[in-house]
Each structure stands twice: as C-alpha cells, then as structure tokens.
Image: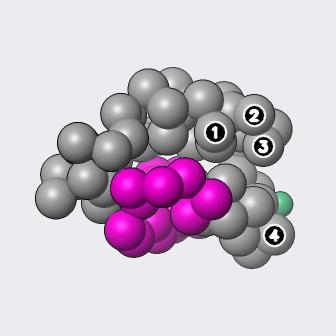
Amino acid sequence: MTQVTLNVPKMSCGHCTMTVENAGRSLAGVSSINADLDTKKVEVTYDDGVVTPEQIRQAIAAAGYPVE
Ligand SMILES: [Cu+2]
C-alpha cells in the first residue's frame, strides 16, 4: 500500500469532505481516504498496482474539488 497526501483547499464543510472521500472511495484500489477540513488535506492509502495518484486526483477534481 502507498500513501499520498493531497491538498484540496476548496473543502469548506463536512459535506465537502464527505464528497471528496466518496469520490476517492469509488475508485478500485483505494483502501482508505481521510479528508481533514482544518488542514484541507486528504490522506489516501491505495494499491499502486491498481490505481495511480493521477487517477485519484482526477476523481476528486471531477467531484468539484481541484487538487493542488
Ligand atoms: Cu462544504
């Protein structure tokens, strides 16, 4: 398992973090995702043989939250 921390500054409430987490969870290979509202960071644990960090970024961006 590989871990990555993404910056998602647009998250502004609990609904945002839920939307971001659900977007990440919808991807095969993502084993855990935790969005922190205070730091605007999203920690993702994933299987790098199944999914790439770029795909995770794109899924979160497609949900309306650009990753910086
Ligand atoms: Cu929100």
Residue 56 pos. (x, y %) = 49, 40
Q: CA distance from mark 3 to mark 4?
A: 12 Å
Q: Is residue 13 visible?
A: no
Crowdedness near tag 4: few (<14), some (14–19) or many (≥20) residues, C-alpha within 10 Å: few
Q: CA distance from mark 4 to mark 1?
A: 17 Å
Circle nearer the viewer, 4 or 1? 1
Which residue type carries mark 1? Ala
Which residue type carries mark 3? Ala
Give the extent of the magenta segment: 25-44
Indicate yes or no whether the magenta region holds residue 11: no
Tell me the SS state at disc 2. helix
Contact, mark 1 vs mark 2 (Cβ under 8 Å): yes
N-term mark: 3 or 4? 4
**Residue matched to label 1:** 59
Circle nearer the viewer, 3 or 4? 3
Q: CA distance from mark 1 to mark 2?
A: 5 Å
Crowdedness near tag 1: few (<14), some (14–19) or many (≥20) residues, C-alpha within 10 Å: many
Tell me the SS state at disc 4. helix
Q: Is residue 21 left or right of residue 57?
A: right
**Residue matched to label 2:** 62
**Residue matched to label 3:** 63
Q: Is residue 63 above or below residue 20?
A: above
Q: CA distance from mark 1 to mark 3?
A: 6 Å
* Mark 4 C-beta to ligand 1 under 8 Å: yes
| Residue in the picture at 23% in, 42% down | 49
Residue 59 pos. (x, y %) = 63, 39
Front-lying residue, 25 or 15: 25
Q: Is residue 36 left or right of residue 13?
A: left
